[in-house]
Amino acid sequence: MAGVSEPKALYRSALKYLAAGEIERGVALLRQSVPKDDDFVEAHNAWARAVMPGSDYIEILRFLHEELRPQSYIEIGVEFGTTLRLVGSETQALGVDPAPQIDGELADNIVLYEQKSDDFFAENDLKSIFNDPFDLAFIDGLHIFEQVLRDFINLEKFSSVDSLVLIHDCLPLDSRTAARTRTTQFWSGDVWKIVPCLKHERPDLKLVTIPAYPTGLCLISGLDSESRLLEKNYTEIVERYIAIDYDAIQDKGDYFSLVANDWQLIQETILPIRDNT
Ligand SMILES: C[S@@+](CC[C@H](N)C(=O)[O-])C[C@H]1O[C@@H](n2cnc3c(N)ncnc32)[C@H](O)[C@@H]1O
């Protein structure tokens, strides 16, 4: 009986510490409260909220749409349409998802392709859909490294120097929720490996990760539609980065190129501002 109630007791105690501003202590208790062989999504959520204060990824996406007012937007992985629906009426938007769960109608400027992203790129020419390179893209589909890499490779071909790519789930909580195999409801998969991959294989790109709840948001600019480096070395790259052990990362700030979750700073230093006004 004591074993059953212990996670909840630890969780309740953690919340008290967090409410009192004792973040480190609260987070340590939340970490302890998750059973090794069981799930505890409330604890993971509270832990993520505690270590990633400030705007969550949805708010940041909203800011980006308002700031950039992109002419074109593509989202890979739309689920309920929460982030797809953030687009402004002036944006031509496209969502790709083999199993969307969208309730109700989408606005006229949003088109949904019910297919896997690999199939979408094999069957469609994004440039002829948008008539131009895309302005903003959000990768949030299948949460495994090699898929995210393929999504990035496919997107970059349709980019310009002004395009911006966002990748969700680049800053995991711990090794269990960062694993390729899902054992927890709160899960980022090994999407995060795209960060060291792009930093090392494509140092020409500009990349930062915002520690935004729940699992971080990576922003990439400086794209080169002519680059075929990642595609050419795809097999070796996948092999090399899949092997990385999350627990071996020493300095997460440096590793993930973390920036403060501060909208002013993001605006001033990161965005390739495209003036559509
Ligand atoms: C985390 S949800 C997306 C959430 C959404 N972007 C948001 O923030 O509101 C992930 C979605 O990716 C979709 N998905 C899975 N595999 C995919 C693939 N190969 N290509 C595109 N989408 C995929 C799933 O069906 C699921 O709806």
Image: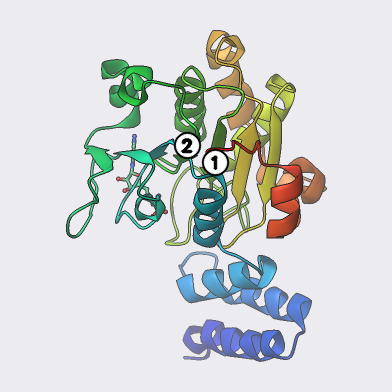
Q: Quadrant of residue 161?
A: top right
In the rendered image of this protein, does residue 118 appear above or below residue 51? above
Residue, disc 2: 137
The residue wearing badge 1 is 166
- Using the image, determine if residue 142 lies above or below residue 162: below
Mark sitting earlier along the chain (1/2): 2
Label 2, secondary structure: give it: strand
Nearer to the camera, 34 or 60: 60
C-alpha span from label 1 to label 2? 6 Å
Whole-percent x, y for residue 106 in the image: 23, 51
Q: From the viewer's perspective, is 160 left or right of 143?
A: right
Which image quarter: residue 211?
bottom right
Which residue does the image show at 17% across and 59% down from the upper left?
Answer: 104
- The reply to whether residue 258 is visible in this rendering is no
Residues at marks 1 and 2 touching, judged by CB atoms closer than 8 Å: yes
Q: Residue at x 76, y 42 (%)?
A: 255
Using the rendered view, name the quadrant where residue 6 is placed: bottom right
Q: Across the whole image, how many numbered discs are drawn on residues? A: 2
Give, as a three-letter code, the residue at label 1: Leu
Question: Which residue corresponds to the image point at 73% horizontal and 21% vertical from the top-left?
Answer: 204
As drawn, 106 above or below 50? above
**Callout 2 crowding tier (Cα within 10 Å): few <14, some 14–19, many ≥20:** many
Q: Say which of 264 and 16 sits in front.
A: 264
- Is 143 located above or below residue 43 in the figure? above
Coordinates of residue 260 in the picture (x, y in percent): 75, 57
Residue 96 x %, y %: 31, 37
Say the numbered circle drawn on residue 148: none
Q: Is residue 222 left or right of residue 117?
A: right
Q: Secondary structure at mark 1?
A: strand
Q: Residue at x 54, y 41 (%)?
A: 166
Instruction: Give the left or right position of residue 44, taking residue 248 as reference.
Output: left
